[in-house]
Amino acid sequence: MALLKGAEALARWRWPSFRPEEVACRGLWPRGLTADRIVADGMTPGILDSALVVDEDAMNLLQETRTRLGFPLFINSAYRSPAHNREVGGKPGGAHPLALGFDVAIHGERLVALVLLVTRDLWYDVRRGGWTALRFEQKDATLLASRYVHLDCLPVTVPPHWPRPHFGSY
Ligand SMILES: [Zn+2]
């Protein structure tokens, strides 16, 4: 798994359904800034390197999931800097600070399609990898936007917070 940071990630961006600002750290990336404006507006390289971290394999898996579903996936949270991860109550060894996890806002029929695809074709397999966790947060009956699933591809060999592959709920 190769991590790309900052300008290198921008230069080697090849995931057409996702923009860098969608998967950058929400705690560090300036709100409202789009990746195509970075060069024009200037952005401290150190901040860019800290805010934008992607794992190529994880992004390939996210893009394959999106492409095969055929509808947009809205990312609530992807990479988190260690500090932002603490702020939002994330676990230190979790998938988000390693750029391996995505919280996708989804519910209803689209959630059914996602679960069918992931469990049938993109679930972890020792030969070809895949998602190693799918965790539901679907409790809120009134505010649909707060319903999401967490998907990640943390290696099954990493001492986990949940035994992996993990299919469960919050
Ligand atoms: Zn998550």
Image (cartoon, rainbow, N blue to C red):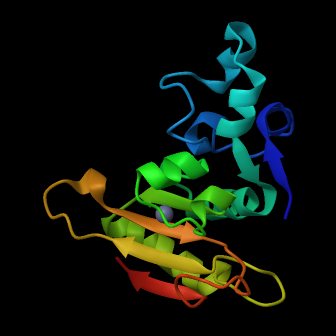
Q: Position of residue 117 (x, y in %)?
A: 56, 76
Residue 67 visible, this orientation: no
Q: Is residue 100 visible?
A: yes
| Quarter of the image where one finds residue 101 | bottom right
Residue lying furthest top: 40
Q: Nearer the viewer, residue 169 or 43?
A: 43
**Residue 64 vertical placement versus 50 (above, below):** below
Q: In the rendered image of this protein, does residue 23 appear above or below residue 66?
A: above
Residue 163 drawn above or below residue 15: below
Q: Residue at x 15, y 64 (%)?
A: 141
Q: Quadrant of residue 95?
A: bottom right
Residue at horizontal 60%, vertical 45%? 23
Q: Quadrant of the C terminus?
A: bottom left
Give the side of residue 26 with respect to residue 47, left or right. left
The N terminus: image quadrant: bottom right
x, y (%) of residue 134? 50, 77
Q: Residue furthest left?
A: 142
Tell me how many marks there are. 0
Residue 30 place in picture, x, y as percent: 53, 25
Q: Is residue 48 left or right of residue 162?
A: right
Q: Residue at x 86, y 36 (%)?
A: 8
Front residue of 19 and 93: 93
At x 60% / y 88%, what residue is drawn? 165
Viewer-proximal residue among 75 and 25: 25
Closest to the observer, 18 or 155 = 155
Q: Residue 17 appears at what percent x and percent y? A: 64, 45
